[in-house]
Image: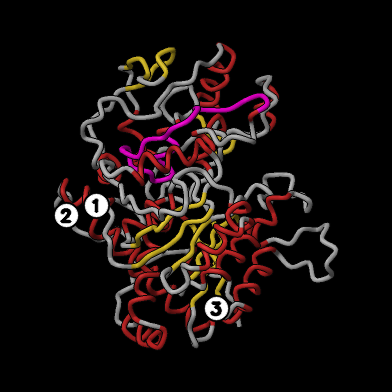
Amino acid sequence: MSARSAGRKEEAPVGRDQLRQFWEPQHAGFRMVDLFAGCGGLTLGMHAAGWSSVFAVEKDAMAFDTYEHNILRAESPYGAPEWPSWLPQGPVDIEELLGGQTTRNEVKKLRGEIDLVAGGPPCQGFSVGGARRTTDPRNDLPYKFVEFVDLVKPKMVLLENVEGFDKPFLAMTDGGRESYADKIKKEFQELGYTTIKMMLHAVDFGVPQTRRRVILLGLQTKAGEATLALAFKRLLRMHSENFHTSILPNTAWPVTIADAIDDLYNEAVVSTPDNPKYNSPLYRESNGEYSALMRAHGESLKVPDSHRLSLHTEHVTHLFAEAHRTQKAGRLPRQFLLDMGTKSRKKFLLDPDAPASTLTSHPDEFIHHREPRIITLRECARIQSFPDAFLFRGRYTLNGDRRGLDVSRCAQIGNAIPPLMTRVLGLAARDLMKEGVANLSDIITQLDNFDTGQLSLDALMELTLAQDRT
C-alpha cells in the first residue's frame, strides 16, 4: 500500500450515480478549442472538469469518427455537441484551416470568446523511441499551434507532448541546440503569456501507467513564472488528492494493472460484435473502484468494446507462455527474445501489482499478466483511463501502405492524452481562471493550509521550471 492510502480507514463504495456524473460534461462556463484532438482524450477530461469545447481540429478521418461518436452526439454520455456553423463538422487539417482566407478570418473572429486553446501536436518526430529526424515535417506543427493562438488570443494555452519534446536534437545547427519545448515556450512568451514548462507523470493522477509528459502552460497574467508554477503545482496536488479520496478512497496508489483490467479477463468468450472472425471475453464482476469508474455509463454493455482477442500463432503463444514461466514481470531481456526466435526488440510482461510502462500505439508490446496473449485494445484503453462507454471507431490495426498514414484504433488509444490526467489539469486550469490573474498569490496562500502530508507525487516535485531549481 502506498503512502497515499496507508492509514486510511475503509470507506463506503462510491455510488453509481456519482461515478456516472464524474464523466459527464459539467458546463462551468469556460470555453476551449482542442487542436490535434485525436480521438478525444483531452476533450473528454476537460469536459469532465467543466470546460466546453467550441470545436476540435483533427485531420484523420478514423480518429475524428471516434471523436464525433463520443463527443458530438447528444445521446452519448460524454456528448457536448457544440460546433460553429462556418466549419464543416468533420476532419480538418490545421494547415488548411489557417491557410484558407475565409476560415482564417473566422478563427480570428473568436478573439475574446475563447478561454483556452489546448492540444497535443503529433509526437512521433520528437519521441526518443523513434527516428527523431530534424527534417520530419510533423516537427513544425507546434508552430501552427502558436499561429492559431496568435489569431485567437485566448486567456490560457496548454500544450502536451512526449519527453523528447524537451530534448534537443543533436543534429540541430541553430547554435543553441534548444529543445522544441523551449522554442515554443519562447513563442508563447513573445505573445504575452507567462509560460511554465513541467514534466508530469500520468501515474500520479490515477492513470495505471508510468507515462511521462511535458506540459507547457501559458497564462495572460502579470505574475511571474515562479508564482504561476507554484500556484499550478498546488492546485494539481489538491485536485489529484481530492480525486483519490472522493472516487478511489480504498485504492492504493499507484493504480495497478490488476485494478485496471482484471474484470476484463474471462475464459468465457463470444464472437466480437464488430468483427465476428475474432472472439472477445465477457465482463467479469467489477473487481474494485477503478474498474467501477471505468464501467460507469457502460452498464448496458454485455461485451466490452474493442476487446478483440488476437489470433496468435503456436510459436507466439509458446513464446508468451515461456515468458510467464521463466521471466520476471517487466521488459523482457533481449537475449530471451533472441533465444525464442523473435525479431522483436521490445516486449513487456505486465505486472499485476504495478502500473504498466508507457503505452504506445503497438499493443503487441505488452503480454497479458494472466494469459499467454497480448492485451486487447479495450485493455489498452483502460490503461489510458478511457471509460468503457467511450467507443472507438475505425480499423483495429493498420499494416501495409496505410500504416503511419491512417490512425487506427490502436494508434488513437496509444497517442491519446489520458482523460484522468487531463481532468485534473482542467480543474487546476479552471481555478486559475476563476481566481483571476491578480490572485495567484492568494491561491498559494490558501493552499498552504491544504494537508499534503500524505502526498507522494514524484512528478509534481520534478516540474522543470528554472526558477524552482535555483
Tell me whether circle 1 and circle 2 mark residues in contact (CB < 8 Å): yes
> Tag 3: Cα neighbours inside 10 Å, few (<14), some, or many (≥20)?
many
Q: What residue sits 32% from the left and 15% below the top?
A: 270
Badge number at residue 115 = none
Residue 242: tell me if it is visible. Answer: yes
Amino acid type, mark 2: Glu
Q: Secondary structure at mark 2?
A: loop
Estimate the spatial distance between the alpha carbons at disc 1 and disc 2, rounded to whole Å: 6 Å
> Tag 1: Cα neighbours inside 10 Å, few (<14), some, or many (≥20)?
many
Q: What is the quadrant of residue 348 in the picture?
A: top right
Amino acid type, mark 1: Asn
Q: x and y percent of residue 308 in the render?
A: 42, 23
Q: x and y percent of residue 65 in the render?
A: 44, 37
User: Circle 3 is placed at which residue position?
Assistant: 193
Q: Is residue 152 left or right of residue 431?
A: right
User: Circle 2 is placed at which residue position?
Assistant: 11
Q: Is residue 396 magenta?
A: yes
Query: Which residue is at the front of the view, 321 or 427?
Result: 427
Which stretch did the figure color magenta?
A: 379-401
Q: x and y percent of residue 304 in the render?
A: 33, 29
Sequence order check: which comes first, mark 1 or mark 2? 2
Q: What residue sits 49% from the left and 76% below the top?
A: 219
Estimate the spatial distance between the alpha carbons at disc 2 and disc 3, rounded to whole Å: 43 Å
Most prominent secondary structure in the magenta stretch?
loop
Amino acid type, mark 3: Tyr
User: Circle 1 is placed at which residue position?
Assistant: 250
Residue 206: tell me if it is visible. Answer: no
